[in-house]
Amino acid sequence: MTQRKSLFLGLLVGLLQTALLLAVGSRLLLDRLNHPRAWARTVPVDPNLPIRGRYVDLQVEVPVIGWSARTSRLAKDEHFIPLQLNIRQDRLFASPSTRKIDGKQEILIPTWRISHLPEGSIAQLPYRLAFFIPPDVPDPSLRPAGEKLWVEVTLPNQGPVRPIQLGVERDGQIEPLSLR
């Protein structure tokens, strides 16, 4: 292969990679602009995967509204139930669902783990979110007592929620964290 062909193939591969990157970035940006956003409480999980870069692994927890004995009987197991995501007052919550299709602002999640706490039922997403952070920023998941970590997410028509930014709840208000 001549040097000219090698240069041409290198440029072609570079253009293809750039086009793919722009397509994915554009899609995520359009989703962020066109789909609803909400805050959800998280529980940080230690990922222990150094090859992926520096990130915080988040287990998202949402309150379940509309839980009843009838809903519990619809589930295959009393701790797992089909739920759909909804937004109310910029907060993410789940409600029981038997629907098989997606709605405009709700996503059917096949099964979630339900925990019954004194303040109500809490559901954990069946997947975890990776939130990437710059190398020189302290780990935002290490919070002082009394502060709870939250994540703002985009609620797309299909697929899992996508993290946008992290925040901390102080005195009932969520303050976004500056991670730059």
Image (cartoon, rainbow, N blue to C red):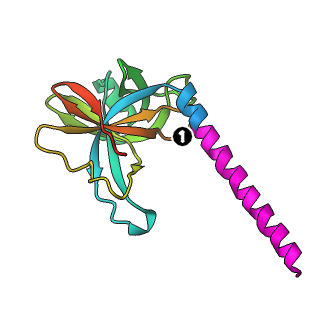
* Magenta highlight on residue 77: no
Q: Residue at x 42, y 24 (%)?
A: 86
Does residue 141 sit above or below 161 in this rendering? below
Q: Which residues make up the magenta segment?
A: 1-28
Q: Quarter holding the N terminus?
A: bottom right
Which residue is nearer to you in this view: 27 or 5?
5
Q: Quadrant of residue 102?
A: top right
Q: Secondary structure at mark 1?
A: loop
Q: Amino acid at mark 1?
A: Gly
Q: Quadrant of residue 150?
A: top left
Residue bearing the label numbered 1:
159
Does residue 165 sit above or below 136 in this rendering? above
Does residue 70 sit above or below 154 in this rendering? above
Looking at the picture, how far across and down is residue 56, in whole percent?
A: 34, 53
Looking at the picture, how far across and down is residue 38, in whole percent?
A: 40, 28
Q: Which residue is most to the left?
A: 145
Which residue is nearer to you in this view: 123 or 149?
149
Assign the magenta stretch its main secondary structure: helix
Which residue is nearer to you in this view: 119 or 73?
119
* Magenta highlight on residue 5: yes
Q: Residue at x 52, y 27 (%)?
A: 99
Looking at the picture, how far across and down is residue 166, in whole percent?
A: 34, 39
